[in-house]
Amino acid sequence: MAKRIEVSDLNAYYGGFLAVENVSMTIEPRSVTAFIGPSGCGKSTFLRTLNRMHEVIPGARVEGRVMLDDQDLYGEKIDPVAVRRVVGMVFQRPNPFPTMSIYDNVAAGLKLNGVKRKSDLDGVVESSLKGANLWNEVKDRLDKPGAGLSGGQQQRLCIARAIAVQPQVLLMDEPCSALDPISTLAIEDLIAQLKSQYTIVIVTHNMQQAARVSDRTAFFNIAGTGRPGKLIELDETSKIFTNPAEKATEDYITGRFG
């Protein structure tokens, strides 16, 4: 079941450097929220704090709260690996496991979670590939390497792998930046379908993409070299792109900077 994310007073650090300063926001379930802003504004860093991927980097740390419904993801007894099962992630470049078949790519997370019965794995692999709009293209070659698929198919395979473990949230860090226009459209169509089941957050440099796929858009900005990124405003996507509240947002969207 999709869940609401409540972020309060979040600061993200790399060692002594404050990368994201004092972000608070609500991310609604069964919707798409897009993060936009110039390079270096902290949007990808902030995205990674939502499933504790940020802290994989040595010296990285977070202050503040990230609540998934009523659970504090940074609580004392919370296992980061368990967090990442609930809050899945799709990365900028498709990253199927290169030595694994299409089938085993999708089943990998299930096997790690202790699912061993082949009939159970078969059902979830099929439903996940169908959910990623990939089943009809690969159903006759499930034993072939996932790395042999096209870039767009690989990215949909990674989405199938992410949804196989039944997360409540899907984070996507520029999922189309390495893809051609046709593959990009397929991913955007898929995002539109998946939002009825998941809470989806997408980082994108493509403002047209943000306008097409998201319900709400958050604009991040950076005050200057060596300064932390900040959330400038978050609102309905239609309002952000037609009547933003902040001049900095308007300047970015109209191409005056960034």
Image: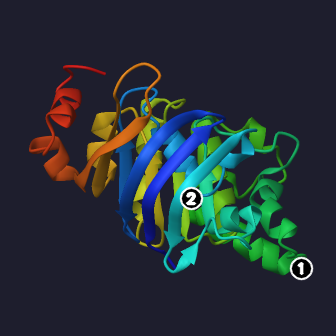
- The residue depicted at 65 percent of the width and 39 percent of the height is 94
Q: Is residue 83 visible?
A: yes
Identify residue type, mark 1.
Arg
Residue 182 vs residue 194, the one in the foreground: 194
* Residue shown at the point (65%, 59%) measured from the top left: 162
Residue 52 screen position, x and y as percent:
65, 55
Query: x%, y% of residue 167?
Result: 61, 69
Q: Mark 2 = which residue? A: 132
In the displayed structure, would residue 151 be above or below residue 61? Answer: above
Rendered residue at 73%/68% (across/down) = 82
Q: Position of residue 247 (x, y in %)?
A: 14, 34
Residue named by callout 1: 117
Up-down relation of residue 82 to residue 133 (above or below): below
Residue 126 place in picture, x, y as percent: 69, 68
- 52 relative position to 118: left or right: left
Q: Residue at x 23, y 28 (%)?
A: 252
Above or below — where is 141 with respect to 39?
below
The residue under label 2 is which amino acid type?
Ala
